[in-house]
Amino acid sequence: MNTREKFGITGAIIAVAILCTTIGLYGRSLLSPAETIANPPGMPDFCRVSVNDPRCSAAVQWKSADAAREAANWAWWQLWISAAGVVGLGITLWFNFRALRLAEHESNETKDALQIARENAAGAARAAQAASEGNQIAREAMQKQLRPYVYLEDLHVSITHLLSYDALADCGTVEIVIKNYGQSPAKDVSMVAQVILGGYWSDRPGVDLQSAARINFADIPSGAVRRQGGYSALDIKRAHQQLTDATASIFVEGQIRYTDAFGNTYWTNFQRALTGEDYHTGPSAITPHWNQAK
């Protein structure tokens, strides 16, 4: 039971008690004086038979005075009881007023509680959204940490001498080495590549992924390498001077495609240039374009 209900019940009890007391005393006041006047106590028997008897005159007057005094007393009590009823009514109204104020206060508190509940629900929704986004970020971070990363590891150039009828020709072949630098195996690995004798790297648009032949590899475990040779660059002897003085280059370019354990597909584009005096033994140079990865 809350405070408002206690106030209401207390006021009702006080009002009922005052009302019952007023009704009871008022009923007695209606009966007692009338009964005294109609049949006053101590009246002689001959006066009850005939009030015109001269002997009864003094007795009747005396009893009438007593009845009037008793009626006055009852009227006085009625006045006090009426005043008490007015006071009780005032108390009841005060309790009702307090109950209304408490109800209004509790209604405001209920509204505040509802507003707080709405704000808490909105905060919980935002927290759930943030948790979902955090889980997504954690999942993506885990995938990035555990996924494979397959890149071009090295190039090996091999030059052989072929005897022809008119001149000694040099035939160059290139071996491509790729490596998985990630923490999980690379699956469905394939590669397209080509070896081109050309001028500057700015003249090379990159490998034609549509027309170039694609070579498939077995899965590459973490830290493992795969080698693929047989890429030829004929007539190197004709370009030997240009290669030596770096006015020409052997371009090795291509693309590696693979998937991870989650089914996501990745690719690595590569383009390397072999030029200079040690073009056939030295390391390859990374060109400024085409080298992209996902």
Image: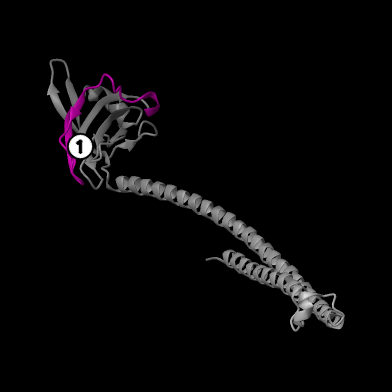
Q: Quadrant of residue 6?
A: bottom right
Q: Quick one: SS at disc 1?
A: strand
Front-lying residue, 225 or 247:
225
- Percent x, y of residue 184: 22, 45
The relative height of residue 172 versus residue 134 in the rendered view (above or below) is above
Which residue carries the number 1 mark? 187
Q: Is residue 36 left or right of residue 277?
A: right
Q: Main secondary structure of the magenta part?
A: loop
Where is residue 204? Give x, y as percent.
36, 25
Tell me the kind of residue under disc 1: Lys
The image shows residue 161, relative to residue 91, as above or below, that is above
Q: Does the segment drawn in magenta span residue 149?
A: no
Q: Which residues are magenta?
A: 201-230
* Residue beneath the point at 59% across and 54% down: 111
Q: Nearer the viewer, residue 163 or 224?
A: 224
Side of 283 relative to 61 (left or right): left
